[in-house]
Image: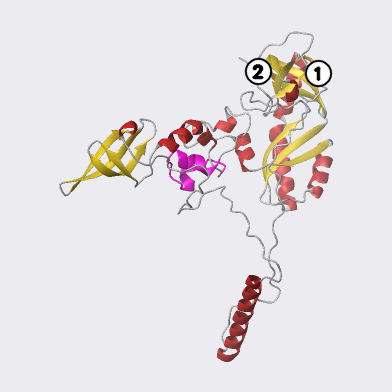
């Protein structure tokens, strides 16, 4: 085990990503502002864990040092840098409008040593901002960095109120984004409507993963909706299930009338497991965000299926051409100069932090209790 000091950069110590630095010879406490050395220069940071023990595999030597506890002069320099953010944001927006670039400016950050300024933006596609960088460099007279982020990182930086009424988790208590899948919503019996399970970023809500372990285990014990089960009052069909109370509502036919009863899960006999492991999930009727289907495999060039499709397309084009020529109507022929739009270049959704501290390794073994 190695002893390290965990720090975060920025104003939010709870939602910032932790970085590991070598423990200093002087004492530091949680919440202290310190000046650390990174690969990009001197930075201002906040101590999260002053004395933390982590596995050797979780760090990448050598660890960068903590130079000193921030002095009043350091605090004043950081305060002046934050005061310049508003002016810098407005100047950058004017430059973006002048160059007519399709990008949304989110945030800017001045380096502690005053050597550079980093602008964060979002855009649908990749943006050629080389001329913009030149204009900004002549305006600020320092090094300019432009960093493109995705929708989730944009919400983390800007913050906001989630559908639950609280501040979004990524901007309040979540240092890093976790994996969220549509199966988590199915396990919890939630509606697959994108408006119900999406956050402010338009992606699946991160809180779906909080209780997924419990719901996944209970979901396998529950019978399917509509399945026939044996109850103490006779056979019936499952109508709804309550995963918190572990009860099942069953529809039973008695004397020609339908009766609905709630039974504990242990009192029912019948097939269990709403979805067998390895079984493919049923497709939802409504579109769901973040559900990407794999691309279809291309047939070999000489395969009968491809030749059949080509012949069909050729026949359709011939029919349209003859129909237009005979009837004198405008068919579905492509206009002159029409082109197919190519695939948009891949967007960098990563949040490449410029600090040089060691990031904790998720796969590293945890400290024994």
Write down the quadrant of residue 264 in the picture: top left
Nearest the camera: 191 or 8? Answer: 191
Query: Would you say residue 135 sits in the magenta stretch?
Result: no
Q: Is residue 161 visible?
A: no
Residue at 54% in and 33% down: 168
**Mark 2: few/some/many CA within 10 Å (<14, 14-19, 20+):** few
Give the x, y percent position of residue 350: 70, 40
Which residue in the structure is indicated by mark 1? 65
Q: Which mark is residue 367?
A: 2
* Nearer the camera: disc 2 or disc 1: 2
Residue at 71% in and 71% down: 302
Give the x, y percent position of residue 38: 81, 25
Residue stretch rendered in magenta on the structure: 181-202
Q: Is residue 223 left or right of residue 49?
A: left
Quadrant position of the C terminus in the picture: top right
Q: Which mark is residue 175?
A: none
Nearest the camera: 186 or 65? Answer: 186
Location of residue 207 with respect to 251 vertically, above or below: above
Query: Would you say residue 201 sits in the magenta stretch?
Result: yes
**Mark 1: few/some/many CA within 10 Å (<14, 14-19, 20+):** some
**Separation (CA) of disc 2 from disc 1:** 23 Å
Disc 2 element:
loop
């Amino acid at each position: 085990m190695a002893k390290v000091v965990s720090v975060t950069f920025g104003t939010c110590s709870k939602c910032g990503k932790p970085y590991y630095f070598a423990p200093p010879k002087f004492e530091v406490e949680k919440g202290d502002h310190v000046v650390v050395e990174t690969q990009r220069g001197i930075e201002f940071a906040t101590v999260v864990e002053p004395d933390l023990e982590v596995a050797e595999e979780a760090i990448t030597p050598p660890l960068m040092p903590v130079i000193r506890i921030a002095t009043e002069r350091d605090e004043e320099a950081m305060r002046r840098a934050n005061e310049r953010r508003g002016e810098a944001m407005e100047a950058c927006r004017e430059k973006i409008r002048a160059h007519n670039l399709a990008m949304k400016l989110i945030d800017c950050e001045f380096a502690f040593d005053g050597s550079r300024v980093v602008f964060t933006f979002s855009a649908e596609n990749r943006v050629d901002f080389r001329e913009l960088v030149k204009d900004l460099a002549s305006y600020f007279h320092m090094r300019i960095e432009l960093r493109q982020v995705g929708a989730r990182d944009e919400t983390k930086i800007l913050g906001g109120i989630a559908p639950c009424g609280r501040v979004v988790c990524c901007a309040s208590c979540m240092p890093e984004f976790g994996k969220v899948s549509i199966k988590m919503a199915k396990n919890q019996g939630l509606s697959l409507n994108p408006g119900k399970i999406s956050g402010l970023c338009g992606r699946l809500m991160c809180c779906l993963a909080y209780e997924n372990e419990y719901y996944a285990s209970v979901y396998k014990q529950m019978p399917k909706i509509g399945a026939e089960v044996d109850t103490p009052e006779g056979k019936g069909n499952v109508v709804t299930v309550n995963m918190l109370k572990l009860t099942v509502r069953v529809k039973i036919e008695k004397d020609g009338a339908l009766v609905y009863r709630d039974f504990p899960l242990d009192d029912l006999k019948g097939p269990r497991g709403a979805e067998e492991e390895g079984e493919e999930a049923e497709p939802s009727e409504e579109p769901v965000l973040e559900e990407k289907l794999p691309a279809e495999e291309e047939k070999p060039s000489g395969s009968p299926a491809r030749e059949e499709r080509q012949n069909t397309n050729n026949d359709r084009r011939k029919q349209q051409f003859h129909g237009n020529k005979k009837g004198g109507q405008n068919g579905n022929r492509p206009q002159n100069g029409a082109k197919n739009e190519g695939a948009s270049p891949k967007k960098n959704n990563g949040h490449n932090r410029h600090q040089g501290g060691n990031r904790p390794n998720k796969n590293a073994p945890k400290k024994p209790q």
